[in-house]
Amino acid sequence: MTANLTIINALLFDGTSEDLNEGTLHVRDGKIVDGGDAAPDASVIDAGGRVVMPGLIDAHFHAYGITLNGFFNDHAPLSYVALVGSTRLRSSLHRGFTTVRDVAGGEKGIAMALERSVIDGPRYLYTGPALSQTGGHGDPRSDDMQLDFCRGHSNQIVDGVSDLRKVVRERFRTGAHAIKIMASGGVISPVDPLEIPQYSAEEIQAVADEATRRGSYVAAHAYSADAVRHAVANGVRSIEHGNLMDAGAAEMMASTESVLVPTLIAYDAMKRRGAELGLPASAQKKNKEVFASGQKAIELAQRAGVEIAYGSDLLGDLEGEQLNGLRLQAEILGNVETLRSATSVGSRLIRRDDLGNLDVNSVADVLILDGNPLDDLGALVDSDRPRTVVQGGRVVFDSLGVSPS
C-alpha cells in the first residue's frame, strides 16, 4: 500500500501500441519514473509475466444515477444519493476504472471526499447537473404535471443566453471539469422527441464560449444527425451517444476534432433488463430505436476518423454491466482500438496526458490482469477474472493475490 512501487516481470500495454513489451514499471511518489529514479525503498510486485496496462477511463459515468427513475434521482435527499453514489464509485474502481467523467451530476462535496480519501473511488471529473432547455432531455416532468422544476442533482433547466452564461460561470467556480448540455431528446425523458435538436445556436455558442475561455469544453447529449451537426457547429467538443448520426454528421465531427463517446452498454442492458427494473414503456420503445442504430454510428465515426472514447451511462442496478460495454465496443472496433478508447483516447478527451498511458511522469494508475486483453478481452471484461488495481502507486484492489513485498 505504498506510492513507491516497482512492478517486475510485466508485459506492458501502454494504451496505444498493438504490441506488448516485456519490462519493469517503476513508481515513485505515485508517478511513473524511469529506472534511474526508482525509489530505493519501493515495494515490489512480481507480475509473473502478466499484462500490465493503464487504468481504465469511463468518460460517461453517473455517480448520482442511483435508479432508473430520473425524477427520484433528481429529488431524493442529496445525502442519500451521495452515499449510494459512493458505493457506485468504489465498485467502479474495483473493476479497473481508475478515472471517471461524471457528465450529469456530481459536485464539490463528493469530489473532496474522494480527494481526501474519505471514500474510495476513481479520479473524479464532474460537470455538475446537465443543462437542459425547458421540455428538454433534462426536464423530468411529464406533460400532465403542473410542477415547478428548476434544478435537481443531475439536471438543471436553464433557458436563454444570459442565464446560461451565469450558470456556466458558477459551475467553473465550484470546480466543474467541463459543461454538459442536452442537445437532443433522450430515452428516459418523458416529453421530448429523440431527433429534434435542443437549445438554439446562440445558447450553445454562449456555453461553448464560456467553457473555452476557462480552458475547458462542452459535452453534449445528442442522438440524431441534426442534433450532432447543430452541437459541433456551435462549439461542442464531446458528443455523448450519437446513435442516430449519419455519415455527414460523422465527417463534421472529424473536421471539428470532436470526440464520440458511445454508450452501447446502457441500451443493451436496458433492452435486456429494463422492464424488470421498472423502465417505463415509453422509454423502452425509444431505447429499442437507439440500440438498433448505436453500432452503426460507431462504424460511421471510425470510418470518418473520429476519435472514439468509452462510456457506460448505466443507471441504478445496471451498474454492474460497466465492463460489458467494452465487449460491445470491441465487436465493432476490435480489441486494441477498444482498449485505446478506454485509456489513451479517454485521456485526450479529458485533457489529462498524465493518465491513460504508462509514460514517464504519468500518474501510476495501472491494472494487472491474468490474461492478455489484446487477444482475449475476457481477461479484462469478465468481472470474475482476477485483477489488481493500482491507483497512484497504491494497490486499491487485489484479487490476483500479488500484494507488494
Image: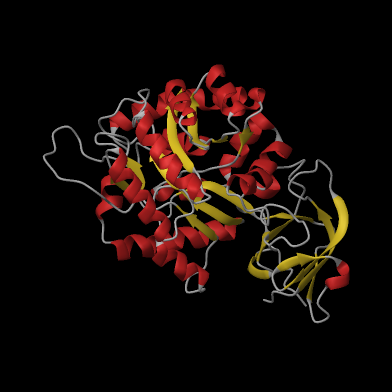
* Quadrant of the image occupied by residue 2: bottom right
Q: In the rendering, at what x and y percent does residue 174 appear?
A: 40, 61
Residue at image position (33%, 50%) is 167
Q: How is the image coloured?
A: secondary structure
Foreground of the two, 218 or 391? 218
Foreground of the two, 231 or 269? 231
Q: In the rendering, at what x and y percent does residue 285 appear?
A: 35, 26
Residue 342 appears in the figure: no
* Quadrant of the image occupied by residue 134: top left
**With respect to residue 183, does 211 lie above or below?**
below
- Image quadrant holding the C terminus, namely bottom right
Foreground of the two, 332 or 402? 332
Q: In the rendering, at what x and y percent does residue 402 appear?
A: 74, 68
Q: In the shown orientation, is residue 173 left or right of residue 311?
A: left
Q: In the shown orientation, is residue 251 left or right of residue 32?
A: left
Residue 153 appears in the figure: yes
Q: In the shown orientation, is residue 43 left or right of residue 302?
A: right
**With respect to residue 236, does 402 lie above or below?**
below
